[in-house]
Amino acid sequence: MYCQQCGQPTTEREHDDRLRPVCAGCGAVTYLDPKLAVAVLIERDGRILLGRRAEGTHRPGTWSFPAGFVERGEAVEAAAAREVREEVGLTVAIGDLLGLYSAAGEIVVLAVYAATRATGEPRPADDLTEVGWFAVDNLPSLAFPHDHRIIAAWLRRRHRPE
């Protein structure tokens, strides 16, 4: 890795009780911040929409929610709606945050929303090869361990008394 300020090589050194890239030339410390991604759980007629991940993606051939990265300066909810449009061609209204998902050693933090409305017919695009509506008791091979936790959070919210 090279210094973002002067371009000199960095070496890992302890700084603020962690190993971080520190410039050998100017001493600037690089903080490796996480990336923020969004996913949207879309339900229609008791089934949830999932997309099969294409070659060249993480865990190709498995299924997950429409998802992607938040652009710098973009509102998280706007990114969620954009990713749904790009990946499955639906226009959605973004509802409640279902949860934030992260794991030690993982560089991505995932914010998951439930859609309150979705218009259009889904079609695979971007990083997906196909899309499908699935009953929660008959799911295909899911891409990520947190996908089951997301569905459980959504089911709890659906069955919560108002």
Image (cartoon, rainbow, N blue to C red):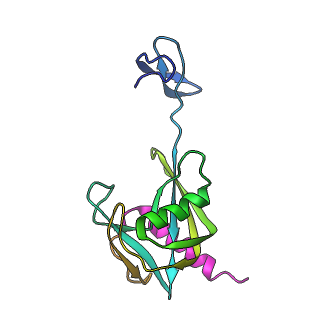
Q: Is 43 in front, or is 144? A: 43
Which residues are the magenta region?
142-162
Q: Is 10 in front, or is 13? A: 10
Q: From this viewpoint, which residue is outermost toward the bottom? A: 45
Quarter of the image holding residue 66? bottom left
Quadrant of image for the N terminus? top left
> In the rendered view, would you say 21 is above or below 69?
above
Q: Is residue 64 left or right of residue 129?
A: right
Q: Residue at x 48, y 66 (%)?
A: 84
Q: From this viewpoint, which residue is outermost toward the top? A: 25
Q: How many marks?
A: 0
Residue 52 among those drawn in magenta: no
Q: Residue at x 29, y 61 (%)?
A: 60
Question: Residue 140 placed where, x, y %?
Answer: 34, 75
Determine the main secondary structure of the stretch shown in magenta: helix
Question: Residue 104 placed where, x, y %?
Answer: 48, 46
Question: Residue 154 placed where, x, y %?
Answer: 56, 74
Q: Is 25 in front, or is 154? A: 25
Residue 149 among those drawn in magenta: yes
Quadrant of image for the C terminus? bottom right
Q: Residue at x 44, y 76 (%)?
A: 49
Question: Residue 32 placed where, x, y %?
Answer: 50, 34
